[in-house]
Image (spheres, rainbow, N blue to C red):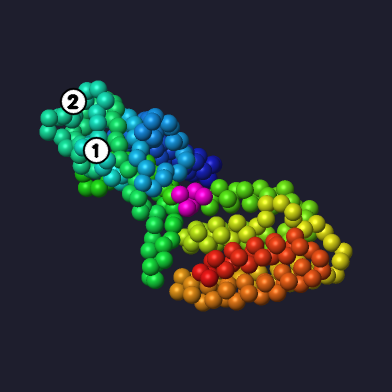
Amino acid sequence: MVTNKRFTRTLFFITLLSIMLSGVLVGHRTVGAQVVPIKITSFEVTTLDGRSVGTQPLMAGATYQVAFTLEIAAGVKDNVTLKTGLTRTGDRFWSLSGNYSGINVNTWQPGQPEITFATVEGKVQMKSQGSVPQDFVRVTGPSGEIYHIGKPISLLRVSLPGGRVLEEKTQEVIDKPIETYRALLGDKQKLLAENSTADKRYVDLVTAMVAASEAEANQGNVEGATNLLEAIPQSGWIEPQQSSAYQWIIVGALALISVVLLLILLRSRSELEFAKRSVDEEAKRLEVLASRARGIGDVKLSEEINKVRDNLEGMSGR
């Protein structure tokens, strides 16, 4: 009997404790959900002619307009700071749409990339305009070589005093060389998928060239990556062959070019000159393969090998 009473009391206390803990956790979730003093409720990037950019990358050097709406909750006593990473193109970055009592249009400084103003409950509709720096995605290497590496730019950062960031809108930036490379990469990947029935060794070769170009582009060597993709023929891919001479030519070309691709994949920036010399040497050896292809009467294959050789020589600076 005593044991049953103790068990009942224990069960009661456990149940009561569970209810109390649940209330605490729910309370924390509710408080956390309510702490959104200022938020961006609308945001759109357009070109100067009004065309919406959407989620597409921005172009280095181009000018854009950013229209946005801030919603400020009641009871916010801090000032709010807006900042953009764009560069100024006119006499101002910011413009206010309609009226907002938190901003004194006679004293604010819309020509600065960062502005601070008082918070008043309600919505603030604004626009900003600026350009992406021309050299935003360009990096100069130790030997003066230029690399192109896409990266995001901050279009709008909303923060409170002390640096607490409430929200930030960013978008990727690229330049013309990166855009050209990406378009060509998409074409070659599609071409590879459409020619999957070609000779397996040839398909493997093209696959390796595409992978090597991606590795080069990721390191910023977009021109070299583009040259590598341009060496892939658009048509006339080698069909499966039974001739041992054909097999020898394909295997030889694959082996030699694979050495070059491996060097490209493994090299670091400090090994750039070594890689270029190796590419130059292998390009010369491809000329021998092209001659042998002509010797067995396959002029088309010889031309394709020569095209690969020419592009490899271009990469090595010959």
- Secondary structure, magenta segment, majority class: helix
Task: Report the span colored magenta.
Answer: 176-180
- Seen from this angle, which residue lies furthest right? 242
Q: Seen in the image, is 167 located left or right of residue 74?
A: right
- Give the image location of residue 303, x and y in percent: 70, 62
Name the foreground residue: 314 vs 7. 314
Residue hosting label 2: 101
- Work out whether residue 130 or residue 113 is closer to the camera in this orientation and state it: 130
**Helix, strand, or loop for circle 2?**
loop
Q: Tell me which corner region of the image, top left, top right, bottom left or bottom right, holds residue 279.
A: bottom right
Q: Quick one: which residue is furthest to the top in this view?
A: 98
Neighbourhood count class around disc 2 (C-alpha, 10 Å): few under 14, some 14–19, many 20 upward: few
Badge nearest the viewer, 2 or 1: 1
List x then y, in percent, for residue 19: 43, 37
The type of residue carrying mark 2 is Ser
Q: Earlier in the sequence, mark 2 or mark 1?
A: 1
Q: Is residue 204 visible?
A: no
Question: Which amino acid type is marked by label 1?
Answer: Gly
| Above or below, comparing residue 21 to residue 294 in the picture | above
Q: Residue at x 22, y 47 (%)?
A: 162
The Cα–Cα distance between marks 2 and 1, rounded to whole angstroms, is: 25 Å
Q: Is residue 179 magenta?
A: yes
Residue 64 occupies which quadrant of the picture? Answer: top left
The residue carrying pointer 1 sits among few (fewer than 14), some (14 to 19) or many (20 or more) residues within 10 Å by Cα, namely few
Q: How many marks?
A: 2
Residue 148 percent coordinates (x, y): 44, 57
Q: Which mark is residue 90?
A: 1
